[in-house]
Amino acid sequence: MDLFDFEPGREGYYGEYGGCFLPEILTTTIEELKAAFQDIKHDPSFWQEFEQLMQSYSGRPTPVSHLANLSAKLGGAQIYVKREDLNHTGSHKINNVMGQGLLCKRLGKKRVIAETGAGQHGFATATMAARFGFDCKIYMGAVDVARQRPNVFWMENLGAEVVAVQDGQQTLKDAINECLRDWVTNMHDTHYVLGTAAGPHPFPEMVSYFQSIIGREARGQIQKVAGKLPDRVFACVGGGSNAMGLFQGFLDDQQVELVGCEAGGLGPGEGNHASRLAYKDASVGVAQGFKTYFLQNKDGNMLHTKSVAAGLDYIGVNPALVHLWERERVRFEAVTDAEVTEALKLCMKTEGLIPALESSHAFARAIEEAPKMSKDEVILINQSGRGDKDIFTVADALDDDHWKEFIKVKAEHYGAE
Amino acid sequence: MALNEYIASRKQNKDLLLMTHVVCGYPSFDANLKELEIMAEAGVDFVELQFPFSEPSADGPLFVKANQIAVESGVTVEQCFEFMAKVSQRFDFKVLMMGYYNTVFKMGHEAFVDALKAAGGCGFIVPDLPLEEAGALHDYAKSQDIAPIVLMTPTNTDARLQTIAKAADGFVYVVARRGVTGGKTEMDAEVGEFLDKCRDISPVPTGVGFGVSAKEDLDFLAKHADMGIIGTAALKAWEEGEEKALRDFFGSLGLL
């Protein structure tokens, strides 16, 4: 299945979803970007250059590891994980960012902007900008700046300017709006490094393309270590980039079931979660440059979203995933905040792994389903990011008393200075 | 009266028409009416009523805040149409809907155009709907004598400007510079050249917006376009001192 072999006149569409809905002033910029992306996509030396860069800079290929303890404890399917957390900067975000960095060089642009929610994408972008010598501005909702200071610290120290966005809900979607405003002003020298496989065409295709490195590696690796293709593949879905990255490796293997795990937050009900497909609170709309399922009211104004994982806390979802969901190629499930923290604790205790809260959604669903599967079945989970880097949020989620005590002492210490 | 006839008749008495803008329900519908009374007195020819949207990504800070507060205070699309009906009955100027495509999409193209027509609107400006996606909506609107207003921008290639011209109806909204609404535009020779090119290519009159805020701007535009479009500057005046400041602002434009 080639999702990106668009029908004439339907460029950027996945079934009914996707497209490019941007102000007229960006038309020329988008045309340039589409052309530059098509060039690299059809240039075999580009992928080679990209792979070499990811090897030398980010430690790829990341391994696929067998979780023997967890599998035995659950008594069902054999569980394997793709270790995207072992990338430089601690998540799969770097794959897309380095790809777009190479593209930006070819476009001859000297400045990059990016939105960030949890800070992972902003952190990765700041790293890339430092390495390639681009000026870098990161837009981040003021609420996210307040809860993700460690990532802001790194972005600033890497040389990026971080702008706390005060509009709207002051989270990821508002940071995207602010990037679009910067871009309509500075498109002549600026490339917008969109961080997820959402937004206007060609971003969903382009981000999916760079992230496909995950699935390309994983398909061969799992056959080697497990002796067969996986029966089920689990990935968390915010915008959808890590899921698209891994799923693309198995799209043509009909026997492999693909499961997208969304942020169930407090559970179903408007404003309680960020689940666009597994719960029934979302509907089709057009915003932030593309058509997809959005969490919105009947007038088309966006609802508040809620999740313990800032990286999944988004109103919309990758349009190709919606298309695959409608065709029943991808199953969608929601995982609540409570289930996520339990899964994280179990992973730490049994395997010594610390998945990010985002990735823990995929773990939680796999942990739920594994016992009902047979021992010769195989599960593959995408560990899209590491949790130890986000110690403030994870400590909050786990409500850790020792950590709180430490912060109090530290705060007193700073206060006394 | 068709839009081109209306524009032609209004142009008999002045060099440059004027379009202004209010964000529906911000700061309140009552305040909107007071703004519109002053605008009517100043002799404006068109008013854009912006339907507030939660993600106003083409707007600058002042309109972003206005959209956000209007949405939070519970302004609905239905209320905006009710307000439009009231406004189009009460005033002589023509009224257009301005907003984002999701508002239109959620209603459905035909329901939106029908509601707009019923409320006395003459057209709509939806900046995040590119021509490539606009066919069905524009066709239905034209069949109902509702003008879909298209935009020309300084980053467009000449070929693209020609394509936009083919889709034009009513008037063309020319964006004077890159960027979002609000902020200053230097009305220099380069801008003048671009405006002349748009006027040349466009089969319908041209209106120019983005950064139009002073009498000098209007004097400049009178030489290069058919209409000036004032958005942020009027809301800024209202924010600074409500009716008095808004009157003073139109006074400074030589209109009151």
Image (cartoon, coloured by chain):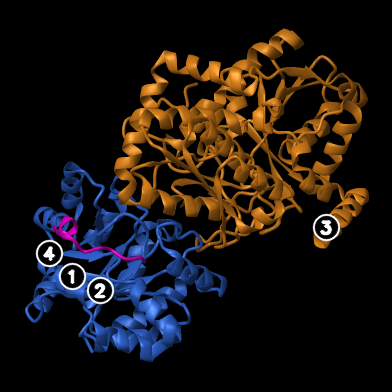
Chain colours: A orange, B blue
The CA distance from mark 2 to mark 1 is: 7 Å
The CA distance from mark 4 to mark 1 is: 9 Å
What residue do we see at 62% from left, 25% from top? Answer: A246
According to the image, label 4 marks what residue? B224
Residue A52, percent from left and from top: 54, 15
The CA distance from mark 1 to mark 3 is: 59 Å
According to the image, label 3 marks what residue? A411
**Residue that sits furthest to the left in the current view:** B12
Quadrant showing the N terminus of chain B: bottom left
What residue do we see at 71% from left, 29% from top? Answer: A85
Relative side of B135 to B51, left or right: left
Question: Of discs 4 and 3, which sits in the foreground?
Answer: 3
The CA distance from mark 3 to mark 2 is: 55 Å
What residue do we see at 75% from left, 41% from top? Answer: A357
Q: Main secondary structure of the magenta part?
A: loop
Residue B189 falls within the magenta-colored stretch: yes
Q: Are marks 2 and 1 in contact (CB under 8 Å)?
A: yes
Q: Amino acid at mark 4?
A: His
Q: Amino acid at mark 1?
A: Met
